[in-house]
Image (cartoon, rainbow, N blue to C red):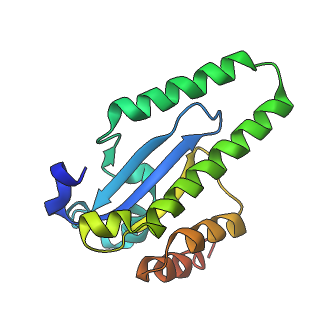
Amino acid sequence: MYEKHGAEGIYSFALYSDEGAMTVCPSSNTQEVLKEVDEDDEMYYKYEPAEWTYEMEGADKEFNDICTILRTELEKNDEDDEWFQGFQAQLYATCIEVLEKLKNENFFKNIIGKDIFLIFTVSDYEFEKQDLKNIIIRLNDNEYKSEYLDWMETWGN
């Protein structure tokens, strides 16, 4: 991602999954892309991974392999709802832990030269507001955290 789009000002990275726990995919966005966004919608496009331009960029094989492993496990246990609930929860927790580890190791800062916004999300699913807030606080120690939390306060208003 950095090799292809680093000059565009990468500011974000997400891992996302789906409610069926069949996928883990990366998503990223750049400051250059944000310049094209209408000012009224800027916060949404800035912080919503579903709207980001670069999905599945880089490490395609590795992420495809992860998705294949997930689907194989799900097929083995497709009739066990209790097993699925635990599997889904563990997958989501693992994605958040991976992002936190990358943050703590300054992975993005070492490559890009600055902290970026990190988030884990699930397509077609909304976390409880407090759970989402906890994810943002856990993954971000930068100006993005306070901006996102301030933006959250406007939801539903």
On the rendered structure, is 47 left or right of 53? right
Residue 87: which quarter of the image? top right
122 to 39, vertically: above or below? above
Tell me: residue 50, above or below residue 60.
below
Quadrant where the C terminus sits is bottom right
x and y percentages locating residue 125 in the rendered image: 63, 47
Residue 110 appears left or right of 98: left
> Quick check: 154 left or right of 102?
right
Say which residue appears at 58% left-offset and 56% top-offset. Answer: 96
In-front residue for pair 3/147: 3
Residue at the farthest left position:
7
Q: Is residue 10 visible?
A: no
- Nearer the observer, 133 or 51: 133
Q: Residue at x 29, y 42 (%)?
A: 57
Image coordinates of residue 44 in percent, x first then y, are 44, 65
Q: Is residue 66 above or below residue 35?
A: above
Query: Up-down: is 80 above or below 13?
Result: above
Rendered residue at 50%/75% (across/down) = 148
Task: Please say whether residue 15 is visible from this viewpoint.
Answer: yes
| In this picture, residue 65 sits left or right of residue 107 | right
Q: Position of residue 2 (x, y in %)?
A: 22, 54
Camera-side residue: 65 or 57? 65
